[in-house]
Image (cartoon, rainbow, N blue to C red):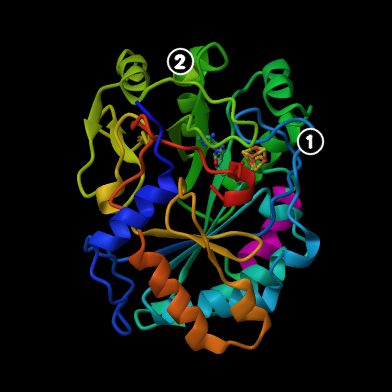
Amino acid sequence: MVAVPVVLETRRAQAAAPREVPTSGPLVDTHGRVHRDLRISLTDRCSLRCTYCMPEQGNEWLARTSILTLDEIEQVARVGATLGISTFRLTGGEPLLRPDIVEVVQRLAAIEGPGGPVELAMTTNGIRLREYLPALAAAGLQRLNISIDTLDRARFRELTRRDRLDDVLDGIAAAATSGLHPLKLNTVAMRGVNEDELVDLVAFALAHDAELRFIEQMPLDAGHTWSRDSMVTRDEILEVLARCWDLTPLPGRGGAPAERFLLDGGPATVGVIASVTAPFCGDCDRLRLTADGQLRNCLFSTSEYDLLPALRSGGGDQAIEAMLRSCVHGKLPGHAINDPSFLQPARGMNAIGG
Ligand code: SAM
Ligand code: SF4
């Protein structure tokens, strides 16, 4: 079958959708999904080089002049909050590499929408977290997700191309005793890499009063090396876990990406994010802002909405609102990973914001 660029699919879907972009009300798309979650990527740089995310060398970094300033991020976030965005998640790249990270947290945590103050969370690799935690918590950060794919030092070095496991473990230990709860740990499950550690990683999370969330590996690495064969699927993950724990599905998932299960009746839980084998696009409420000011309505979008001109030519809040509304309006019903016409986005995960 001839591959059809996803961007053409986008145009087709937009043509079928009502032409008018709403000018009032919440951020609702043409499929009735109300958007409440904004992922904000603060940088595409990182202290690690995870194989499923970035190549070791030759990565093309975003131009420094295009990286949003703190004022610009705050303006987009504030406008989003007035339109019903109620959660901001800071990500990257590695958000803790941003020199003004504490101020970013402070300014975003102070934003209020019609429903009250926003929730503010962060996804991090945990390196230098111990040092930053007190200031981040004081600035208003509420929740943390920390990524850890293996507990084995040699594997960690191979997988991330950096010998930093001890720093990550230290960050997790600090988070576990901080007031930022619930704590979540993210693991990308990979065949022949860490598939024999799934149970150990859950036990590690439980020992830190955290929930482990397994993520199916997605075709989003900047090196375009993803293969379906190297991915460990949701069903395989659950089969392994079910050998050690009774798994009871938790209802009430809403727009959340993770399917969650009680372990042995609870209260401990585990999550699985099965974007590839069990997509959850029908309930997606997420939008993304890249570090260089591009709005994305899906992780897998091949088209973006450029906010930089509005932000840098004094377009004001109205221009940003119009762009947010257009971006939501143009959202497709689902990603096309499992379609033969799927085209991987040009940006790697580090430049999109996971
Ligand atoms: N550097 C931070 C970290 O690693 O937590 C935040 C950014 S990272 C891009 C956010 C999340 O995306 C991490 O949990 C990471 O494991 C996940 N991720 C990155 N590339 C992925 C891929 N190809 N498939 C699935 N998850 C991926
Ligand atoms: Fe860095 Fe996170 Fe990507 Fe790993 S997954 S290379 S820690 S941005």
Q: Nearer the viewer, mark 2 or mark 1?
A: 1
Note whether residue 10 is visible.
Answer: yes
Magenta span main SS: helix
The location of residue 104, given as percent across then percent down, is 66, 70
- Which of the two discs, 2 and 1, labels the residue nearer the N terminus? 1
Q: Residue at x 66, y 62 (%)?
A: 292
What residue range appears in magenta? 129-138
Q: Which residue type carries mark 2?
A: Asp
Compared to 337, does 239 lie above or below? above
Local SS, label 2: helix
Q: Position of residue 75 (x, y in %)?
A: 58, 80
**Residue 131 forms part of the magenta stretch:** yes
Question: Which residue type carries mark 1?
Answer: Gly
Nearer-the-camera pick, 158 or 315: 315
Quadrant into which the N terminus falls: top left
Among the 4 quarters of the image, the one containing residue 243? top left
Q: Does the rendering let one see residue 85?
A: no
Task: Name the residue carrying label 1.
Answer: 58
In this figure, which residue is indicated by the disc labeled 2? 229
Q: CA distance from mark 2 to mark 1?
A: 25 Å
Dividing the image into four equal quarters, which quarter contains ligand 1?
Answer: top right
Mark 1 is surrounded, within 10 Å at the Cα level, by few (under 14), some (14 to 19) or many (20 or more) other residues, namely few
Q: Judge: label 1 CB < 8 Å from ligand 2.
A: no
